[in-house]
Amino acid sequence: MQKVAADPGHSQWYIERFRAMERAGQDLAGEARLVAAMAPRQARILDAGCGPGRVGGYLAGAGHQVVGVDVDPALIEAAEHDHPGPQWLVGDLAELDLPARGIAAPFDIIVSAGNVMTFLAPSTRVQVLTRLRAHLCDDGRAVIGFGAGREYEFGQFLDDAATAGFAPDLLLSTWDLRPFTEDSDFLVAILRPA
């Protein structure tokens, strides 16, 4: 929300950006297709940092039970408008406690796309990962993607994920399954409970 405080028009710009991309016929479902390929039928999926709902909306349309959480009320309002069906909630991932909000069952998959991890305050990164782990089934997986050059080194992220109780299952450099290398400028980490 510091970004929104610094630029009050940011949320609306972000919403309109994806609406314009969709109108132009751009592919906005790459992340969701990867998650859908991993998910059992009618999986329980948490879209952590869901933004305006493009990933969770696609997954709900594919028959999954989706809960999306974002700290920005404007983005949640856009998700509700553009992608009815999932349960969209305003909430801080660092304080995520869905059982307290009546959502007790753990999730088969947690997805966090769109560079969410790099928008977090550095002091909350391990806490967010720990809260995500607490909401994941023991045989579930978390899929987290973000780009390099955003003040969160990939090695530090993997160390933080280990501290939070995750182990890497597979590291990719793109949502379309290209292998991760030392030179990759993007990380898609598929994590399992350690």
Image (cartoon, rainbow, N blue to C red):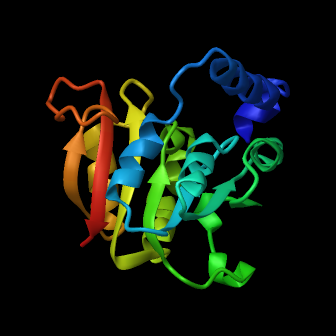
Q: Give the percent coordinates (x, y) of residue 104.
A: 60, 85
Residue 64 in the figure: left or right of residue 84: left
| Quadrant in the picture for the N terminus | top right
Residue in front for this viewpoint, 142 or 59: 59
Residue 56 appearing in the image: yes
Q: Give the percent coordinates (x, y) of residue 95.
A: 64, 67
Residue at screen point 50% across, 79% down: 106
Residue 30 in the figure: left or right of residue 12: left
Residue in front for this viewpoint, 134 or 2: 134
Q: Is residue 89 above or below residue 76?
A: below
Q: Is residue 37 above or below residue 5?
A: below
Residue 44 in the figure: left or right of residue 36: right
Residue 183 in the figure: left or right of residue 131: left
Residue in front for this viewpoint, 22 or 75: 22
Q: Is residue 62 above or below residue 185?
A: below
Residue 90 appearing in the image: no
Q: Give the percent coordinates (x, y) of residue 117.
A: 48, 44
| Quadrant in the picture for the C terminus | bottom left
Q: Give the percent coordinates (x, y) of residue 65.
A: 58, 67
Identify the image quadrant of residue 100. Answer: bottom right
Residue at screen point 14% across, 29% down: 182
Identify the image quadrant of residue 53. Answer: top right
Residue at screen point 38% across, 62% down: 39
